[in-house]
Amino acid sequence: MDRHTHLEGSLAPDWVRLEAARRHLSVPDLTEAFWRGEAHSFEAFIATFVFACGFLTSSEAVAVALGAAVKRLPPPEPGLPRGIDLWISPHWLVKERRQISLAHLWKGLEQGIETARCQGVRVAVVIDAVNHFGPAHGHEVLDLVLGERPSWVVGFSTGGMEKVPFREWAPVFERARKAGLRLAAHAGENGPASRIREAILEAGVQRIVHAVRAVEEPSILELLAERQIPVDVCLTSNHALVPGLDHHPLPGFLAAGIRCGLGTDDPGVMLCDLPGEWQRAMGTGISPEAAQRLQEQSAEDAWCFQIGT
Ligand SMILES: [Zn+2]
């Protein structure tokens, strides 16, 4: 079960290299260095992410990206549910970059979801808006997707730099909620711990992605535990992008009674897969009991099993 992965960050480097060669483009040195693990700066991450997702220009490419996400799940095992909660940024692809139409994006996702279903993998899609672009952008994202929303689009989220307070985003989240979408937010990753509290209390967010900086304020750990707010934990991504993160707070989250699930975030950019994330999680020193709870709650709180297709 992959609790948090982005379609745009899923394309495998080999596919991107082939596609670049087919279009007579060369892969930037910074991107190759990032893939080799030699250039872990936020700038190198963004450059690699943007270069790779520039190839999502057809429904076929979209289906390939989703297929790449499926391949990073653990192999089928009796009794272990397989699913993906997939974040996508349609406004970026359709309106900002104008590289694919919404109809082709939906078509590619439909194909990818159908192929995944044939492999016993359930998928739910969460629409991601960019926090630092502000609430007007959030409304544009909803204008784009709410008109002809496929049934597998089940959630709305914000990502990017946590610069705009969630109280300013509250009307956008409220509109998404009234339209039948569940609410999530990337928070406490590049912004302060207080963003997590704001997202929950001021914008009604039901699920937090990352929440790494929650450990800075015990009251926020308590809030997450008390309200049973699921947290999506992405260890490889956090170690690459959160400065000064020597020890991941996952053991502390589990000890505080916070419900967690593991995700890969941008595994085509930061080169990881779910079995590797599990190894990393076990390497944090969590107990076998905590690992069992993590495994159960990863699936129990996954939207793809609750309302996905
Ligand atoms: Zn993310």
Image: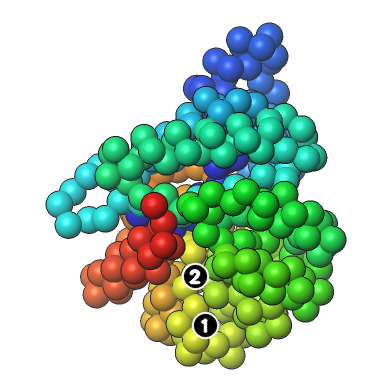
- Under circle 2, the secondary element is strand
Amino acid at dot 2: Val
Residue 186, position in %: x, y? 63, 64
Residue 147, position in %: x, y? 67, 52
Which label was assigned to residue 231?
A: 2
- Left or right position of 255 against 60: left
- The residue closer to the viewer here, 132 or 255, is 132
Residue 18, position in %: x, y? 55, 15
> Looking at the rendering, which quadrant does residue 129 occupy?
bottom right
- The residue closer to the viewer here, 227 or 120, is 120
How many numbered discs, if any? 2
Between the residue at mark 2 and the residue at mark 1, the CA separation in whole angstroms equals: 8 Å
Quadrant holding the N terminus: bottom left
- Examine the rendered structure and indicate whether residue 252 appears above or below residue 47: below
Q: Report whether residue 38 is seen.
A: no
Amino acid at dot 1: Leu
- The residue closer to the viewer here, 86 or 161, is 86
How packed is label 2: few (under 14 Cα within 10 Å), some, or many (20 or more)? many
- Examine the rendered structure and indicate whether residue 257 appears above or below residue 267: below
> Looking at the rendering, which quadrant does residue 92 occupy?
top right
Q: Residue furthest left?
A: 78
- The residue that appears at 69% across and 33% down in the rendered structure is 101
Dots 2 and 1: beta carbons under 8 Å? Answer: yes
- Examine the rendered structure and indicate whether residue 56 appears above or below residue 190: above
Q: Report whether residue 157 is seen.
A: yes
- Left or right position of 101 against 134: left
Residue 98, position in %: x, y? 77, 32
- The residue closer to the viewer here, 138 or 261, is 138
